């Protein structure tokens, strides 16, 4: 990766552990993370007794007994019994809460054996919420295109599925309309609190404020939240609405717009049930990886679908944001003028010496005329946080330059609440205006556009599916592997490629320019110095394998030191190993070698005599001497340039020399001349020439004179002007027997009172696929809770059916702020 800066965009660095939080009344029970709490107090992750005292959870703390639910997950541990008691007492609000979680989703169940349920979910968050409902007695058991079957507290209930109002990245919510066995029609909806709160009935105002306070408490733990609501529908109204829906679903023009209008219409006047909180944990090694990449001068940007508060919490947990930073600029303007003013103010604050014109362009002083010098002169650490609707304005042509300049001046950049299209636009902006190699890393379908736009795409294979992996150049299971990909394999690859190119140019200049010097003596008659077979085989046989081994196996320092000293990555970013200067030096070395290869034998041959007293006067002997000297010189040179010797290197280098002599003596033997006299005219030349000691003396002299200047220059440079690589290599040689010392990077934990963010999948939901029935086989649903029932078998290949669906990533409106759950995106731009 050879660029001034490397750009890396990543996502999906966390795994999930989820439960739900509940507000059954204005002062009702609330729970979050791995704990559901009693009505008197709600605090994420803690348990309080009836006296409002915090209870510490230890190994000796008794778990809640779920024996009343034979279908619960035995691995599930829960410590607050108040919510379980509310379930057993048949609290209507609590039951309705869990009923919503069990009905409003697109999860597919698979029952491999009696009571052994496996849920296949579009999002891990969605699967976690359905699992939570299962453990509290509302078990999602089966699904057909027309029905959803639950086991509610041991009683089988089948709901008629009337409609799925699917999630998309504009609506940021999902709803289902079902008919209960009693004939009552209900709409259940879940989505972002800002979206749901706008559609609530005025009678829920008090509960809305209480729930909002609970959500703010959850923010201190960095939890993602969803609001839950429901609505009772009138039979006559629903019939009329359903006819309009069927008509809108069959139109050709503006179909999506008409459906959106109908969805908005029926989702008004809902009643609030509560909220869920999802804990989104960082994968192991994420903070350490980010810190190491920062030391490698890789600029890290975060592109996430989370809201601002959660994105900032993630930034603090990753050590990208710190309390000792000079300033954290938050860009949240709703108009073009507001965003422009905020960007200009932030830039003026950083620069000080610059004059920002009214058009938004920066007029740098002479001291900062060069962009790279200007950015390096910023010693203080700043962070930029910008949300989606502000980013939409900032990406306009008149503001994109000031946005990019400001972002490059900041240590950390976090773009939150961004759509898949905006992710790709940010990557494209850096590619278009900066000499940088961009790398995007993500784990979900909403990262596909970003991954495809970047120079290098990396997909994380995990719970988010395989869309990102299929669209990427590289894939692995953990974000921390990015550190080894870049700092070890990426740096080695750049080092090998540069050495490969430098040596390749050197040996070909040395080989080819001998003809140029020979032209002065043959009148430029196009007569060649070498035998035609040598010209043919030089690059194909004699020198191909050694340079290939260098390009595959060479390494200047080992992998432990590459990780221990991230600054070794910087020469690649600065194009130090192969640039115009290095190309000129390779060319100069090749020209000098060709000059010596020709004129040393040319000057020695008139003075040489054979052992029988005769002189060397034939052109064939002169050609063999130069060819032999050339092969030996380039073989010795690649041996000196090789930093890491393997058995393959030895085999290819010394084997190529032996192959050269074997082919040389074979082609100039009596046998081949007898068979092909016109193709092998140099009969006996090699045998006669290389049997003379004077010839070998000339070959030795030529090799030493060609190799010594470069060897002396390299020795003096390493001794007098060592680079960081030279120092690390010397240290590595002196500590061969000492194991690597692990860096102790301390993870800083932070609690905050900021509002938790809401991460949502930007991929279209699977509601239409479920109602079509294409992903399942129809079967008769019998009594699922009786011992005599036959387990319903669903198609186990439903995931394959969904993967065949076209991966559509739509662009959300910058003002939209809600949706269905997704993992928050930790996007790294370097």
Image: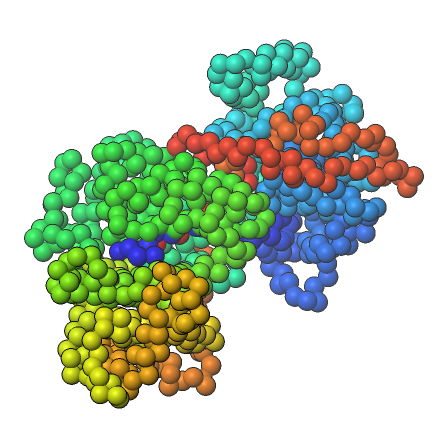
Q: Residue at x 70, y 56 (%)?
A: 77
Q: Position of residue 24 (x, y in %)?
A: 64, 38
In this view of the protein, which residue sits in the foreground, 665 or 156? 665
Q: Quadrant of the N terminus?
A: bottom left
In this view of the protein, which residue sits in the foreground, 117 or 611? 611
Please tell me in which quadrant of the rendered image residue 398 appears.
Answer: top left
Q: Position of residue 607 (x, y in %)?
A: 16, 83
Q: Quadrant of the C terminus?
A: bottom left
Say above or below: 679 vs 336. Answer: below
Q: Position of residue 420 (x, y in %)?
A: 43, 38
Please tell me in which quadrant of the rendered image residue 576 appears.
Answer: bottom left
Q: Is residue 640 left or right of residue 283?
A: left
Q: Position of residue 801 (x, y in %)?
A: 65, 35
Total count of labels? 0
Say above or below: 219 vs 172. Answer: below
Q: Residue at x 66, y 30 (%)?
A: 770
- Residue 557 makes an appearance in the image: no
Which residue of the protein is positioned furthest toward the right in this rendering? 788
Please tell me in which quadrant of the rendered image residue 691 appears.
Answer: bottom left
Say above or below: 300 vs 762. Answer: below
Q: Is residue 407 left or right of residue 802?
A: left
């Amino acid at each position: 990766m050879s660029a001034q800066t490397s750009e890396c965009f990543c996502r999906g660095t966390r795994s999930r552990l989820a439960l739900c939080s509940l507000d059954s009344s204005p002062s009702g029970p609330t729970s979050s993370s791995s704990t559901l709490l009693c009505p008197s107090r709600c605090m994420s992750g803690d348990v309080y007794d009836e006296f409002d005292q915090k209870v510490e959870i230890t190994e000796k703390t008794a778990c809640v007994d779920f024996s009343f639910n034979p279908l619960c997950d035995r691995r599930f541990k829960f410590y607050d019994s108040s919510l379980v008691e509310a379930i057993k007492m048949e609290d209507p609000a609590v039951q309705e809460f869990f009923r919503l979680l069990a009905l409003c989703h697109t999860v597919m169940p698979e029952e491999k054996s009696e009571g052994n349920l496996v849920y296949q979910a579009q999002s891990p968050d969605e699967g976690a919420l359905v699992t939570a409902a299962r453990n509290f007695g509302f078990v999602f058991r089966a699904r057909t295109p027309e029905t959803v079957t639950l086991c509610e507290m041991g009683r089988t209930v089948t709901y008629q599925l009337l409609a799925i109002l699917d999630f998309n990245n504009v609506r940021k919510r999902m709803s289902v309309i079902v008919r209960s066995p009693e004939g009552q029609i209900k709409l259940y909806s879940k989505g972002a609190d800002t979206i749901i709160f706008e559609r609530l009935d005025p009678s829920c105002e008090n509960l809305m404020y209480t729930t909002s306070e609970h959500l703010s408490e959850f923010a201190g733990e960095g939890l993602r939240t969803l609001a839950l609501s429901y609505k009772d529908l009138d039979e006559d109204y629903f019939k009329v609405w359903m006819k309009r829906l069927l008509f809108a679903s069959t139109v050709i023009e503006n179909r999506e717009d008409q459906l959106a209008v109908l969805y908005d219409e029926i989702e008004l006047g809902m009643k609030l049930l509560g909220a869920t909180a999802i804990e989104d944990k960082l994968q192991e090694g994420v903070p350490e990886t980010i810190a190491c990449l920062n030391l490698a001068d890789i600029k890290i940007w975060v592109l996430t679908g989370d809201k601002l508060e959660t994105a900032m919490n993630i930034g603090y947990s990753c050590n990208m944001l710190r309390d000792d930073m000079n300033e954290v600029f938050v860009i949240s303007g709703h108009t073009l003028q507001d965003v422009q003013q905020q960007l200009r103010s932030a830039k003026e604050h950083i620069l000080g010496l610059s004059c920002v014109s009214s058009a938004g362009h920066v007029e740098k002083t002479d001291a900062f005329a060069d962009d790279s010098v200007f950015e390096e002169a910023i010693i203080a650490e700043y962070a930029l946080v910008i949300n989606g609707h502000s980013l939409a304005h900032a990406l306009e042509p008149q503001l994109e330059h000031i946005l990019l300049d400001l972002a490059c001046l900041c240590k950390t950049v976090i773009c939150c609440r961004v759509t898949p299209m905006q992710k790709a636009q940010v990557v494209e902006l850096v590619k278009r205006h900066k000499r940088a190699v961009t790398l995007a890393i993500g784990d979900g379908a909403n990262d596909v556009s970003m991954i495809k736009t970047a120079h290098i795409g990396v997909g994380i294979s995990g719970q988010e599916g395989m869309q990102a992996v299929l669209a990427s150049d590289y894939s692995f299971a953990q974000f921390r592997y990015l550190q080894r990909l870049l700092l070890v394999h990426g740096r080695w690859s750049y080092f090998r490629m540069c050495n490969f190119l430098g040596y390749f140019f050197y040996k070909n200049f040395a080989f080819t320019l001998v003809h140029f010097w020979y032209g002065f003596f043959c009148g430029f008659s196009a007569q060649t110095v070498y035998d035609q077979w040598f010209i043919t085989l030089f690059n194909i046989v004699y020198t191909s394998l050694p340079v290939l081994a260098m390009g595959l196996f060479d390494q200047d320092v080992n992998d432990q030191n590459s990780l221990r000293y991230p600054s070794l990555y910087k020469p690649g970013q600065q194009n130090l190993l192969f640039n115009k200067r290095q190309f000129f030096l390779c060319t100069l070395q090749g020209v000098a070698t060709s000059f010596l290869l020709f004129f040393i034998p040319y000057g020695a041959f008139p003075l040489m005599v054979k052992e029988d007293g005769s002189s060397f006067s034939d052109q064939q002997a002169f050609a063999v001497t130069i060819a032999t000297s050339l092969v030996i010189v380039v073989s010795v040179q690649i041996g000196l340039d090789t930093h890491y010797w393997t058995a393959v290197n030895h085999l290819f280098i010394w084997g190529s020399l032996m192959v050269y002599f074997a082919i040389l003596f074979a082609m100039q033997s009596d046998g081949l001349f007898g068979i092909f006299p016109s193709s092998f005219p140099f009969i006996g030349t090699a045998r006669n020439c290389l049997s003379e000691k004077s010839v070998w003396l000339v070959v030795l002299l030529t090799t030493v004179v060609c190799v010594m200047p470069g060897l002396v220059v390299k020795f003096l440079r390493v001794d007098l002007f060592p680079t960081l690589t030279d120092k690390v290599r010397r240290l590595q040689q002196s500590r061969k027997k000492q194991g690597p010392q692990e860096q102790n990077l301390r993870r800083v934990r932070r609690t905050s009172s900021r509002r938790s963010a809401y991460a949502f999948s930007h991929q279209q939901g699977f509601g239409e696929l479920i109602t079509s029935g294409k992903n399942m086989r129809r079967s008769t649903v019998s009594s699922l809770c009786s011992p005599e029932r036959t387990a319903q078998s669903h198609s186990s290949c439903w995931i394959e059916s969904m993967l065949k669906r076209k991966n559509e990533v739509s662009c959300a409106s910058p003002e939209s702020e809600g949706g269905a759950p997704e993992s928050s995106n930790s996007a790294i731009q370097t």
